[in-house]
Image (tube, rainbow, N blue to C red):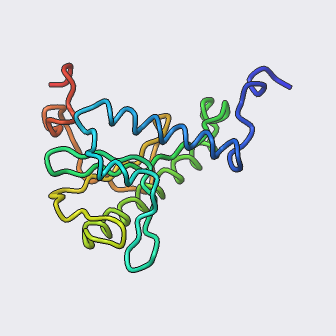
């Protein structure tokens, strides 16, 4: 066994992966809760729940935030990145990009459904003016499939809530 593989997480599915994924979702929510995006108690109660519309499951909410009429819906993808990915292995990088691209496209569909049907069986987003869907991964990853919603050429074009003190 090589040292580089001795400390690798062994499972991509199963109990260990579920614990790791749950922890990742909780950490994202903790970061949101420590920010101006901290949701009110009614929205916060939706985290971890499966949203339903006409008796059909739409999605579960991994993390959620709200600010000034905007609802932040986060899909957390706790994908494992291996030493092969870090080394630039073509298949690993391609598979990661495909996985993230598919997740972005799926999340766009989910957000579109919620926007079109703001009141469901167990949720009420009728007071929401804007929906913001985000796919979050533990590491920066390329994404081949997903079309960017908008291209930002300068930091000054970022929405004010996304800027930090060092951005223009």
Q: Is residue 53 left or right of residue 168?
A: right
Q: Is residue 130 left or right of residue 46?
A: left
Seen from the viewer's position, the closer of residues 98 and 40 is 40
Q: In the figure, residue 146 lies in which quadrant? A: bottom left
Q: Which quadrant would the N terminus be assigned to in this image?
A: top right
Q: Is residue 66 left or right of residue 101?
A: left
From the top left corner, tell me how far across and down residue 90 is, in percent: 62, 42
Outermost right residue:
1
Q: In the figure, residue 130 lies in which quadrant? A: bottom left
In this view, 35 is above or below 70: above
**Would residue 66 be seen by someone viewing this image from the given angle?**
yes
Total labels drawn: 0
In this view, 96 is above or below 118: above
Residue at (14, 25) in percent of width and height: 168
Outermost bottom residue:
54
**Would residue 141 be seen by someone viewing this image from the given angle?**
no
Seen from the viewer's position, the closer of residues 14 and 2 is 14
From the top left corner, tell me how far across and down residue 80 is, in percent: 61, 39
Residue at (63, 41) in percent of width and height: 19
From the top left corner, tell me how far across and down residue 9 is, in percent: 70, 34
Residue at (18, 31) in percent of width and height: 155
In this view, 46 is above or below 115: above
Q: Is residue 59 left or right of residue 10?
A: left
Residue at (75, 38) in percent of width and height: 10
From the top left corner, tell me how far across and down residue 15 is, in percent: 70, 46
């Amino acid at each position: 066994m090589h040292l580089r593989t001795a400390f690798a997480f062994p499972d991509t599915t199963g109990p260990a992966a579920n614990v790791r994924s749950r922890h990742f979702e909780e950490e994202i929510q903790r970061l949101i809760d420590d920010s101006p995006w901290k949701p009110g108690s009614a929205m916060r109660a939706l985290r971890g729940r499966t949203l339903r519309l006409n008796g059909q499951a739409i999605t579960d909410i991994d993390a959620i935030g709200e600010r000034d009429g905007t609802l932040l819906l986060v899909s957390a993808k706790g994908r494992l990145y291996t030493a092969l990915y870090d080394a630039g292995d073509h298949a690993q990088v391609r598979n990661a990009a495909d996985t993230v691209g598919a997740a972005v496209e799926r999340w766009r569909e989910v957000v579109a459904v919620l926007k079109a049907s703001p009141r469901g069986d167990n949720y009420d987003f009728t007071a929401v003016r804007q929906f913001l869907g985000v796919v979050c991964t533990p590491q920066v990853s390329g994404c081949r499939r997903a079309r960017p919603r908008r291209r930002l050429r300068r930091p000054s074009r970022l929405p004010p809530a996304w800027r930090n003190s060092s951005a223009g």
